Image (cartoon, rainbow, N blue to C red):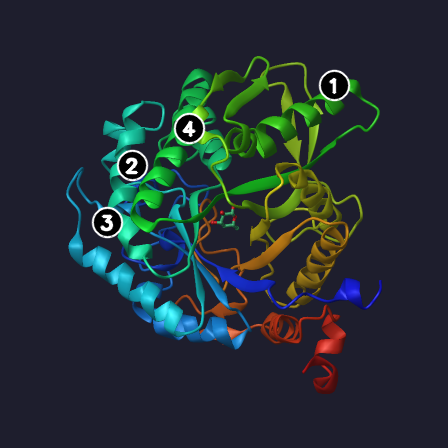
Amino acid sequence: MSVHAQTFPEHFTFGVATSAYQVEGGIENDWAEWERAGKLKEPHARCGPAVDHWNRFEEDYALARAVGATAFRISLEWARVEPEPGRFDEAALEAYRERLTRMRAHGLRPVVTLHHFTHPTWFAGLTPWHLPASVEAFRRYVRRVAPLLEGLDALVISFNEPMVLLLGGYLQGAIPPGIADGPRTMAAMENMVRSHAAARQELLERLGRVELGISQNMLAFAPDRWWHPMDRALVQLSAQAYNHAFHEALSSGKLRVSMPGVASTRVDIPAARDSVEFVGVNYYTRAHLRFVPRPPFIEFKYRDRRERGYTDIGWEDWPEGFLQILREVRRYGRPVWITENGIDDRDGQRRPSYIHEHLAQVLTARAEGVDVRGYLYWSLLDNFEWLEGWGPRFGLYHVDFQTLERRPTPACDYYRAVATGRRLITPAEATQPSAAR
Ligand code: FCB
């Protein structure tokens, strides 16, 4: 690699990512209900006080700065803001405004997700995503939170990983609201695309201009049997439906999904055309797909083909897939933000090389002309992982879940060295003080 190819330009942003429910604590929403019903993979896990970010936000902003971050991704918790339909909690709105203002004062650009998987408890009963009324409900919420973003030059994400919510919550019934129905899944998807467009209108009306996108979970799909035509066909269909259909709808205004026998839709939503300023990518791993001759006809697995060893949550460590995905999103002709990338690494030893190898792919993509503008590591802190509870550790900082004390993992020094040096060095180089700083 040439020196140029190892360097991040001045305007490239390094940051960290979080979401409200996973870190704030004290939130009552549909996920908390789900936990109490014992429906998580870890049926006794409770998020509860999470890692108390709601009270420790100043400390956490300082921790982000200490690893060289200049952007901080949070989400607004809809359930805090609108605890009853149409009743907004002014104190909660004020509290978010205070947090965003302090974030700015710490030199962190806010990256604000409006919706990160969770809902007020009334939502599923009244306006679940498969009903058209969900669009107006989301619009009403966005209208009230839009003023919080005034004057902050925030990057705004309407939805985090909409396909994860749709697959998990509407097609498989594994997460709230626990529906398992193909046509409703497609109706929900359509309404989420419409809601994104509605959110955009509200934001533009209030702010004049906005930098808006979604964060899409993108998997590097591969056939389980490289020679098998059905496995290969599944890869094509899944990449289109899971990775691209949402992005495409926000770019062309045409929502197209075709998963024969599972879920399909074809609808034009002109309001969604050209409705993003950037493409948000969450990349973690590769998924192998295998055709099985009985419903649901598809088997999904993580394999360790390169024998790098699975990450602690059991996902394949496959940095090459990151480049593949970055090349694919180039087609949207928009700047790209990595809104999440990270590793569950419970002893913290492997994280620096994971980051190193993934940033190397970002540099290669940039050298090829993919306009990647920023990288937000998931996550600043260990936190509550949706289905697994308190086992996984994605944090740059280790959190003692009893005392809530934050302690740096080895990746803190590494991340700071790269983010402030703006050169991709190896973890070994970062431990030699002269090379790192
Ligand atoms: C992503 C989620 C994020 C976090 C990471 C590990 O799918 O967006 O909240 O749980 O996975």
Which residue is tagged 4? 271
Where is residue 266? Give x, y as percent. Answer: 51, 16
Image quarter of residue 350: bottom right
Q: Amino acid at mark 1?
A: Met
Circles 2, 3 touching at the beta carbon (< 8 Å): no
Q: Is residue 183 above or below residue 16?
A: above
Counting residues from the start of the chain, the first of labels 1 and 2 encountered is: 2
> Quarter holding the C terminus?
bottom right
Q: Amino acid at mark 3?
A: Val
Which residue is tagged 2? 139
Circles 3, 4 touching at the beta carbon (< 8 Å): no
Between tags 3 and 4, which lies in front? 4
Which residue is tagged 1? 230
Where is residue 322? Give x, y as percent. Answer: 69, 47
Tell me the element at label 1.
helix
Counting residues from the start of the chain, the first of labels 4 and 1 encountered is: 1
Between tags 3 and 1, which lies in front? 3
